[in-house]
Image (cartoon, rainbow, N blue to C red):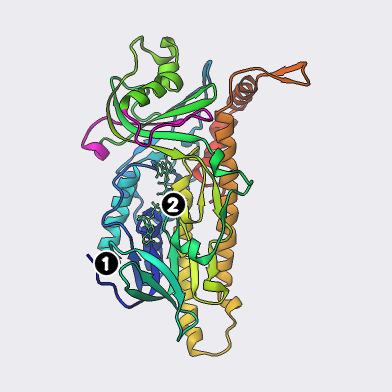
Amino acid sequence: MSTQLPSRTDVLIVGAGPCGLTTALSLQKHGCTDILVVDSHAAGDNTSRAIAVHAATLEAIDEFIPAQRIVDAGVKATEGRMWDGYRFQPWANFGALEGYTKFPFILFVPQHVTERVLGDVVKEQGIRVVRPAKVVDLVPNEQDPDVTNAIFEDGQVVQARYIVGADGTKSTVRSIAGISYLDPDGDDIADATLGVVADVTLNYAPSAPTEPLMVLASGAFSLCLPLPASSYAGRTVWRIAAGLPAGATPPHAPPTAYLQGLLDAYGPGALPPRARGSTQRLAITDTLWASRFVMASAAAATPFARLRGAGGVLLLVGDAAHRHPPTGGQGMNLGLRDAAFLGPVLAAHVRASATARGAQGVPRAQLDRGLADWAAARHARALKVIRTTKAMLARSSWKDELVWYWGVVPVNWVRVRNFGMWVLGVTGITARVVPWDLSGLKGR
Ligand SMILES: Cc1cc2nc3c(=O)[nH]c(=O)nc-3n(C[C@H](O)[C@H](O)[C@H](O)COP(=O)(O)OP(=O)(O)OC[C@H]3O[C@@H](n4cnc5c(N)ncnc54)[C@H](O)[C@@H]3O)c2cc1C
């Protein structure tokens, strides 16, 4: 059934996922109120997907909505444990951020809960969200070169001065704009490793209720993270995530037996009983949600362009602009900060363009400078996060085996990595430095 759309708007946001909603909230806070958000799905995706929210993201969001509403829905963790195959190593101590941020912790909150909080605020602020409404084409408006006609699946047309593509990895906006979306290192998606994520209940807690546990196994790794009880009607639920050995092909919706196998082989089940603190097998008692995912990386060549080089403004935020492995829990965070930082810049452009339409001779390049600077900064940030998360993925997946160099020099890279982590741990670097990187406070 068709949903009636308005015939025009200043800003059309394509995608009502976390990054689209955040763009709308940031724009409105900075004085741009003529906003329309559309989404092809009738309702939001009610699955937990990204669960880590970092301090820099909460700070960015706190500029326009009380981030405490998201914090209240999650689990705050400062400490964690990491098993390197032989012993526990120190984990990043997010408590070290105390005094530098209002949010000195890593927050675990399922994505559908974050989206629900953002959606509630969008509704309270009276921002228009229309679902289902799928954008299928973008064409220049014949009367005004700064306007784009967004064509919807049912034939409706919305004229917009600005189009923000918050429409995920398969972004229609990005494809129509002809913006490439490639791995910066030239890696092929066909070679990408697969991972599995699931929300499960367990027969006993593998860690303290606010303490994540990471296990580095040979050629694979896993994480067990505590979820807030409120996300599953008061139940004690754990997120398990695993990076699998190269070549493994997990099913699309892995069943409990498959997940149990991962837990036993690469998870806390693989730890000796003394390290696990129990001789009892750690068993999954219920699977609430499970999915596999591709750990591929890509960045849009630019998150800012003009349609066909000379038309209306097109912008990309979130997964439409970048994707990368989930190591370090960076994915949604990077996108939410793209959106939060776009708000003031785009709102200023909307105001300046309205003034310029009354005056003559304001060159476009001058008008667009703020957007170009935002785009350059976000693109550089995306490349940095892609490189970091890929490096973390590679180091977490090394095989515990001897590699012979020149036929005479044996190296076990897992032992080298573990020794390096031990040095970083005893010198306090892991505790003090790593949280700055992961939280986004060092580079937003
Ligand atoms: C199975 C799975 C597991 C994941 N696990 C993790 C994890 O553990 N950690 C992590 O950091 N990240 C994870 N992610 C990634 C995380 O979910 C994304 O980074 C996040 O959703 C990005 O938000 P977004 O708003 O950019 O895009 P999305 O959430 O993808 O939202 C895009 C929206 O655009 C809409 N849309 C698309 N095309 C159109 C169109 N043509 N017209 C109108 N609307 C359109 C879609 O319906 C959708 O609602 C996972 C993703 C998946 C799928």
Q: Element type at marker 1?
A: loop
Q: Which residue is under mark 1? A: 126
Q: Which residue is under mark 2? A: 59
Q: Along the horizontal axis of the image, is 387 left or right of 340?
A: right
In front of the other: 387 or 81: 387
Spatial CA distance of label 2 from label 1 is 23 Å
The N terminus: image quadrant: bottom left
Q: Nearer the viewer, mark 2 or mark 1?
A: 1
Q: Position of residue 376 (x, y in %)?
A: 60, 61
In front of the other: 188 or 368: 188
Residue type indicated by callout 1: Gly
Q: Is residue 232 above or below residue 87?
A: below
Residue found at x 59% / y 30% = 395
Q: Position of residue 289 (x, y in %)?
A: 30, 36
Q: Position of residue 136 (x, y in %)?
A: 39, 66
Residue found at x 63% / y 25% = 420
Residue type indicated by callout 2: Glu
Q: Element type at marker 2?
A: helix
Q: Residues within 10 Å of mark 1 (few under 14, many from 20)?
A: few
Q: Is residue 406 above or below residue 329?
A: above
Q: Which portion, as a residue range, is magenta?
A: 230-255
Q: Is residue 222 above or below residue 273?
A: below
